Image (tube, rainbow, N blue to C red):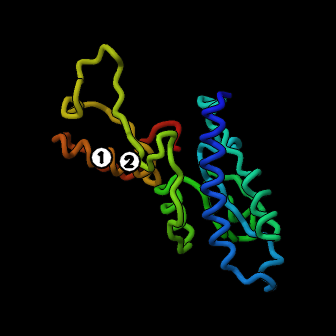
Amino acid sequence: MSPRRFSLRAALLCALALCVTAVCSLLPAQSPESARPLVLVVMDPLAAPLACACVRGYAQRDYAKLGAYLEGKLHRPVKVVFDDDLAGAMSGADGRADLIVGKQATVLYDARECKLAVRPLAMLTGKDGSTTITGLFVVPSRDPAKTAADLKGYRIFFGGPEAEEKNAAAKAALRAAGVPVAEMSGPETSCRLS
């Protein structure tokens, strides 16, 4: 691992830790609630336990270290639960999720499905410090399509509705390019949704 990559990861985890510490410090210090573990649900597809094999060596965010850091700062146990599905994570944490880390669109979608009121607190960033996610339309290199408008009549696979950048945003971009997008009763999706 290069020193720059290590420094960036460390900086991202430190920034997230500071945000979480600030929020958690507002909780009552000696209440019965403080004896219960703080449940940190990790849905981040770049967390080491959730990462796709295709990004091995890159997607290795270590949230167990964040949990240990928070325990030390908050003097409270922290339970870190990894799952790409909020309902699954909460079922492994007595139905609780005090803090959730993941892609915004996925977290908000799953929270609606679980009827859990949430609000964004901080944003994860890419290597460049940006919070913007960029999507691509990909065709074989010899395909004649050069722009989104050229995709009329193509069979296009979308991500699930929980992945805004792979579903609604992609459909909006196609519509803006004049490509009709048929709405299906059950979306035809790519094999990897996150």
* Residue 188 location, quadrant: top left
Of residues 26 and 104, the one drawn nearer to the viewer in this rendering = 26
Q: Identify the residue position indicated by label 2 in the image.
A: 167
Residue at image position (71%, 46%) is 62
Q: Is residue 187 visible?
A: no
**Helix, strand or loop status at disc 1:** helix
Task: Pinpoint residue 10: horizontal percent, then vertical percent.
Answer: 66, 45
Q: How many marks?
A: 2
Quarter of the image where one finds residue 116? bottom right
Q: Nearer the viewer, residue 28 or 38?
A: 28
Left or right side of 69 for 179: left
Find residue 3 and report its horizontal and vertical position in percent: 66, 31
Residue at the limit of the structure toward the top, as seen here? 142
Which residue is drawn at the image coordinates 22% and 29% (left, top)?
147
* Disc 1 to disc 2, C-alpha distance: 6 Å
As drawn, 151 above or below 103 = above
At label 2, the amino acid type is Asn
Residue 174 in sight here? yes
Which quadrant of the rendered structure holds the N terminus?
Answer: top right
Q: CB atoms at circles 1 and 2 under 8 Å apart?
A: yes
Q: Tag 2, which secondary structure?
A: loop
In the rendered structure, find residue 171 and report the number of the disc placed on it. 1
From what the image shows, is residue 68 above or below residue 182? below
Image coordinates of residue 192 in percent, x first then y, are: 53, 38
- The residue under the point 50% across, 66% down is 120
Relative side of 159 to 170, left or right: right
The residue furthest bottom is 31
At 65% from the left and 50% from the top, the residue drawn is: 13
- Closer to us: 170 or 127: 127
Amino acid type at mark 1: Lys
From the viewer's perspective, is residue 169 above or below residue 32?
above
Up the image or down, 57 lies above or below 26; here it is: above
